Amino acid sequence: MSLETLERETLAQVDAAADEAALEAVRVAALGKKGTISEQMKGLGAMSPDERKNFGAALNLLKDKVTEAIATRKASLADKALNERLARETVDVTLPVRGEGRGTIHPVNQVWEEIVQIFGDLGFAVAEGPHIEDDFHNFDALNMPPEHPARQEHDTFYFNEKPDGSRLVLRTHTSPVQIRTMKTQAPPIRIIAPGRTFRSDSDMTHTPMFNQVEGLVIDETTHMGHLKWVLHEFCKAFFEVNEVRMRFRASHFPFTEPSMEVDIQCSWKDGQVKIGEGDSWLEILGSGMVHPNVMKASGLDPAKVQGFAFGMGIDRVAMLKYGIPDLRAFFDSDLRWLRHYGFRSLNVPTLAGGLS
Ligand code: PHE
């Protein structure tokens, strides 16, 4: 067969290859070890030097042409395959929604809703504040002036400095909502503020974004007995137990005085925690009587009003209530995890109908 014929036939085969597998077969048949073009090399040995030179050059040219034709065909076949796939996999957004029970409610949303239900029943309203805060609301007004050591403990995410030298922050706790509420609402105040908070921290029990719920009660006579009662009622309702012992430990927060950390009674069996029995303790929140400086910074007169505040980790109590070991998994968006720990979408928690 002449090289011209070989070229014509091989290029025709390349053009005719309907998919990448067929093209690969054409390549092997022509350029493979025993391919039609490779076979031509064998003739070279019997040729005179001049013949060999000419034929060799022509053969190399043919090889290059075929190689290039294959590459071009390959690219166009890949494009075609992709276009076909894109056409096949279009999503018809006008289709009716799938039956109930496919999607699930994330445990954080579930627990968030449970908390709102319980405090709503106790007469608390829900307040909100921005995720991006200024120094005043996140620190200063909470009795944490710039030099205060507690600022360091917060592992704050700062924004770039503004021309005046100030820096906005991602709020490190929901406590700035205390300030915003006291500045805009006259006592009596009874609010909770669930929301996202941010600290530069990550391990089994810390994620850079996490959820807290703040509580704030201000009027003329609210005292620590009320704080203890509210938290006790909350814990019984939330953990769905008839009784739970609680321990109020003296602690320190710049924005409360006195300050208490609250532990709840629990037992550990086979690495599983049970709330409301046993003789171990688990810390679940920080609390205290609102510091007079915080009231002053918010425009209230501490000689006339008083009250309490608390802050609790929503993700943390979700882990405790539903036995979820690793906090980071909350935010991985792993469908298998979501199906395992998620809640049925139409099962809205209510105190009357059962929380979980
Ligand atoms: N803001 C505190 C924290 O994030 C919790 C807290 C809130 C403590 C209100 C007391 C009163 O750790």
Image (spheres, rainbow, N blue to C red):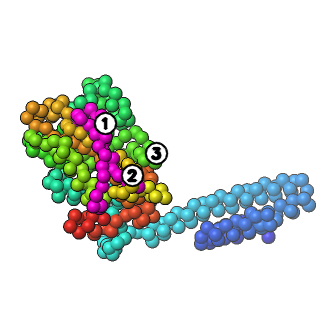
Q: Majority secondary structure of the magenta segment?
A: strand
Q: Residues within 10 Å of mark 2 (few under 14, many from 20)?
A: few
Tell which residue pokes out farthest to the front in this image: 279
- The stretch of residues the image draws in magenta is 240-267
Mark 1 neighbour class, 10 Å CA radius: few under 14, some 14 to 19, many 20 or more: some
Residue to which mark 1 is pinned: 251
- The residue to which callout 3 is attached is 203
At label 3, counting other C-alpha atoms closer than 10 Å, the crowd grade (few under 14, some 14-19, many 20 or more) is few
Task: Give the alpha-carbon distance from disc 1 to disc 3, as whole Å.
Answer: 24 Å
Among the 4 quarters of the image, the one containing residue 217: top left
Which of the two marks, 1 or 2, is nearer to us in this view?
A: 2
The residue sitting at 72% across, 66% down in the picture is: 28
Residue 164 percent coordinates (x, y): 26, 25
The quarter of the displayed image where residue 200 is located: top left
Q: Where is the N terminus found, in terms of image quarters? A: bottom right
Up-down relation of residue 13 to residue 45 (above or below): below
Say if the magenta span includes residue 246: yes
Marks 2, 3: nearer the viewer: 2
Could you tell me the amino acid type at mark 1?
A: Ser
Mark closer to the observer (1, 3): 1
Instruction: State the residue at coordinates (70%, 65%).
Output: 27
For the residues labelled 2 and 3, the Cα–Cα distance comes to 27 Å
Instruction: Give yes or no for residue 302 being in the magenta stretch.
Output: no
- Residue identifier under label 2: 279
